[in-house]
Image (cartoon, coloured by chain):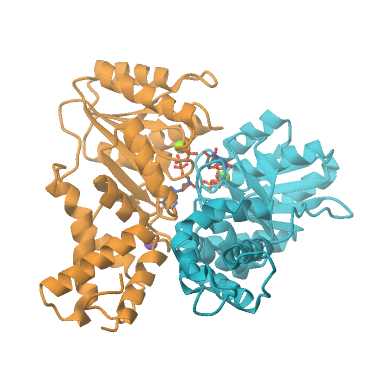
Amino acid sequence: MFDALAERLESAWKTLRGQDKITETNIQEALREVRRALLEADVNLQVAKDFIETVRQRAIGAEVIAGVRPDQQFIKIVYDALVEIMGESYSPLAQADPSPTIILMAGLQGTGKTTAAAKLALHLRKENRRALLVATDVYRPAAIDQLVTLGKQIDVPVFELGTEANPVEIAQRGVAHAKALGVDTVIIDTAGRLQIDTEMMAELAAIKDAVQPHETLLVVDAMTGQEAANLTRAFHEQVGITGAILTKLDGDTRGGAALSVRQVSGQPIKFIGVGEKVEALQPFYPDRLASRILGM
Amino acid sequence: VGQGPLGRDAVEEIEMLLLQSDVGVKATDQIIAALQAKIRQETLPADQAIAYLKQILRDTLDAPFRNGYAQDFAPQKGQLNIWLIAGVNGVGKTTTIGKLAHIASQSGYRCLIAAADTFRAAATEQVKVWGQRSNVEVIANPGKNTDPAAVVFDAIGAAQARGTELLLVDTAGRLQNKANLMEELKKIRRIIDKKASNATIESLLVLDATLGQNGLRQAQVFAEAAQLTGVILTKLDGTAKGGVALAVVQELGLPIRFVGAGEGIKDLRPFSSFEFVEALLSSEVEVAA
Ligand SMILES: Nc1nc2c(ncn2[C@@H]2O[C@H](COP(=O)(O)OP(=O)(O)OP(=O)(O)O)[C@@H](O)[C@H]2O)c(=O)[nH]1
Ligand SMILES: Nc1nc2c(ncn2[C@@H]2O[C@H](COP(=O)(O)OP(=O)(O)OP(=O)(O)O)[C@@H](O)[C@H]2O)c(=O)[nH]1
Ligand SMILES: [K+]
Ligand SMILES: [Mg+2]
Ligand SMILES: [Mg+2]
């Protein structure tokens, strides 16, 4: 399974081959190639730098394993470090007791929040949990229609107060409505916003303050470039996230944004979006994404 | 790459600026090589590297205008122009259509919108709201999951009957690796070419400034499927720089036509290589020679 990366590192390996130990000098070139691979996969420059440092330290300190060539050993160190940093395998959604569990969706414009809200509701239904969707995006044209349409498709109720109401109030009344209905999960869809839009970020913080969600999920487009680190930092610092959903992984992006999101927030990526349809949600597996980022 | 009149520190700093703006490893290497060559050939003082760098970047972005693309970009009055707007999911196609419809009607064009995203939930409702905002009619098919090419066919018919000058075609978001969806886009393009053979056709790819290197792949595949003639770069009001658009211009020779910088109806501007380059390098630090 390490073939593709090995091929990539071909010339770098020449310095490692024939040597019985990984040293500071003989891994320079290999580390540069790994850095290049990470940057081509859109891992944030600073995040890549930190990762390379981790790998360098581990590689130099690594014991020589009998029968394993140092170049193979090096690839394994890179891969293992990436999987480890990517986080624990499948961290499921919070489940509050007493119910309802409150989930707040957040993120930049167009990343897939509304779609992911519906996908989560369907996912919960399959686990025999009943959800209520709450439409607080009063800004984007037809955002409420979109959520209502999706709700109908999956047979999940949608709470909305039109576009004249205040998003904080919609969220609060949505939660109250969920309690009245006796559903066990409330999923609050929010408008897309830039992390530098102070007014909109304050609105999101106010929604969070008002409803005290058990999960605040940052929805990030897997095709995002260097910006993934900046936006994650800002959302985490200003609002606080408990996890992330990485969308549009059905594309052919390498998905380096995942590493940035995970490294910067320290929070797990919980799900990935793999299509436009409401069924297209999967749990996140760190090993699969590590292979993808490294082009393996 | 580090070889040349520019010192290692300077190269590293410029590299950092470009990579952090999503210009990408390959394009960055090429730009730095060009910069080194320029300084060497013209024996320029290396401490003004940033100024030459800006010039190289602007030249790259303006190259399409030296290679047959007209610098001025506007629909031809008194005849039908069709602008096909395509791109991956969520980049801002529909919003851009809304903004374009506004500019067009403000400038006195008879304008029409084809709602050819028949797939996404409430896509038609969304584009209709945009149409209302600038009093531009939207041709849609109320049926569910209808063939988008059929909507385009109807819209061209309506445009021809009414003497429309600008028909804006909103398409569904599609990832470039989905063969069936790219086939659907090709079909839309074929219908346009066939039914409106006298029209001036522009085929514009919408790229989102937050996109990383996949943007280049998108441009390559869409260029073929939709016969792209240009690019629109959205979401430049954020802190993302949209550097991948530079790589797209460099590799595909397509001009950037507009930039989107907000969600409001007026937040669309013609592209300026000067503004783009200044913003791209705006986190610039003093570069040591
Ligand atoms: N291919 C693919 N498309 C997706 C995925 N998730 C969402 N989309 C599409 O991405 C586009 C944007 O999705 P939305 O759910 O409207 O995104 P949003 O974050 O709610 O957008 P705003 O509310 O405008 O900020 C739509 O075309 C969706 O169909 C995914 O996992 N794969
Ligand atoms: N900040 C900012 N947001 C934008 C800009 N252009 C579009 N958006 C937002 O991005 C989100 C997606 O925009 P749409 O126009 O629906 O994108 P689309 O490409 O038509 O999406 P699909 O049809 O689902 O593929 C919306 O929330 C828009 O308001 C822009 O220039 N700046
Ligand atoms: K910007
Ligand atoms: Mg939404
Ligand atoms: Mg659209």
The residue shown at (47%, 66%) is: A14
Can residue A219 be seen here? The reply is no
Find residue B246 and report its horizontal and vertical position in percent: 30, 55
In the picture, the quarter occupied by the N terminus of chain B is bottom left
- Residue B91 shows in the view: yes
- Chain in cyan colour: A
Instruction: Give coordinates of residue B273: x percent, y percent.
Output: 23, 58
Residue at the extreme right: A98
Instruction: Give residue B15's position: percent from left, percent from top.
Output: 35, 70
Ligand 1 shows up in the quarter that is top right
Q: Quadrant of residue B67?
A: top left
Q: Quadrant of residue B222?
A: top left
Q: In this rendering, would B101 be left or right of A59?
A: left
Q: Is residue B258 left or right of residue A27?
A: left
Residue A161, percent from left and from top: 65, 43
Residue in view at x 83 percent, y 45 percent: A184
Q: Colour of chain B?
A: orange
- Relative to A97, say whether B221 is above or below: above
